[in-house]
Amino acid sequence: MNRFRSVTFLFVLVISTFLWGIMAILIARLAGRADLAHICGRMWGRWNLRAAAVKVRVKGLEHLVQGPAIYAANHQSMFDIFVVLAELPVQFRWLAKEELFGIPLFGQAMSSIGYIPINRSDRRQAFRSLEEAAERVRQGTSIVIFPEGTRSPDGVLQDFKKGGLILAIQSRQPVVPVSISGTYRILPKAQFFGIRPGRARLTIGEPIPTEGLEIKDRGVLLERVREAIRRHLPLREGGLALDGDMEE
């Protein structure tokens, strides 16, 4: 059954990427409406969650901020991308690794919508990307980052990299912690078959202000954000919540 579900998911992934990707590119380039193109990304996420029979429970919507922010989420699985696109009800742009922009059509759609590539192998280029992202935020655009930098190999929260938190300090906007739970079980890293339908959970935490912080404070901010994300993850995922608490 899992193999059949995986084949179905892959079929929908290819079709949805083509259809919504083309639509996003046309809307962004011809109509100049990146906000509407982002909605195409939201629909792409919903289609693929449905194809994998994944249901998402969302908590903490009252913590969404009015205005731009840095949304920082943990990263367990490729399904995190679908979950955030489909269920985080704000206009945002991704700060994403440069390699993704080389994927035919997918990368073009990302560029058209205004996602920002970051070259993690070149420190200077990475800082230029962070400066561009910070300017976008100051102009009113929210950014989503994965501070771990890559997917967790075992579903447990990893150490954070400081780059994304430097972005928050440079932009002077709040960091909103986002805890994603359950996606590792659905599809672990380095696997593409064996999708297991199930439930995921997205919890939006209280915003963490960055006003008054300087670059030298990035380590302190990093720990605050990481602990805020841990608060809404179960123990088995490196969090602080008991399994019973997660069922509430």
Image (spheres, rainbow, N blue to C red):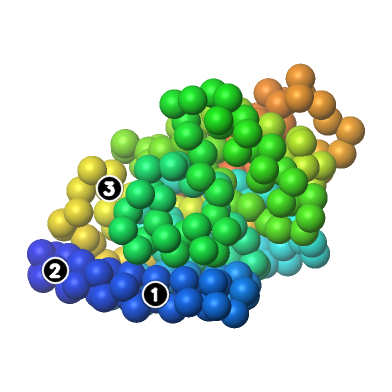
Residue contact at pointers 2 and 1, CB within 8 angstroms: no
**Position above or below: 15 against 219:** below
Residue contact at pointers 2 and 3, CB within 8 angstroms: no
Task: Look at discs 3 and 1 and give the one toward the viewer.
Answer: 1
- Image point (40%, 56%), residue name: 107
Whether residue 170 can be seen here: yes
Which residue reaches farthest right? 212
Instruction: Categorize mark 3 by other alpha carbons within 10 Å: few (<14), some (14-19), many (20+).
Output: many
Q: In the rendered image, which residue does mark 3 sit on?
A: 188
Of the numbered discs 2 and 3, the one sitting upstream in the chain is: 2
Label 2: element kind: helix
**Image mark for residue 7:** 2
- Percent from the top left, x then y, of residue 64? 72, 62
Which amino acid is tagged 1? Ile
Foreground: 58 or 235? 58
Instruction: Categorize mark 1 by other alpha carbons within 10 Å: few (<14), some (14-19), many (20+).
Output: some
Q: Quadrant of residue 115?
A: bottom right
Foreground: 165 or 248? 165
Foreground: 83 or 41? 41
Label 3: element kind: loop
- Cα distance between the residues tagged 2 and 1: 23 Å
Q: In the rendered image, which residue does mark 1 sit on?
A: 22
- Image point (81%, 26%), residue name: 214
- Percent from the top left, x then y, of residue 49? 36, 71
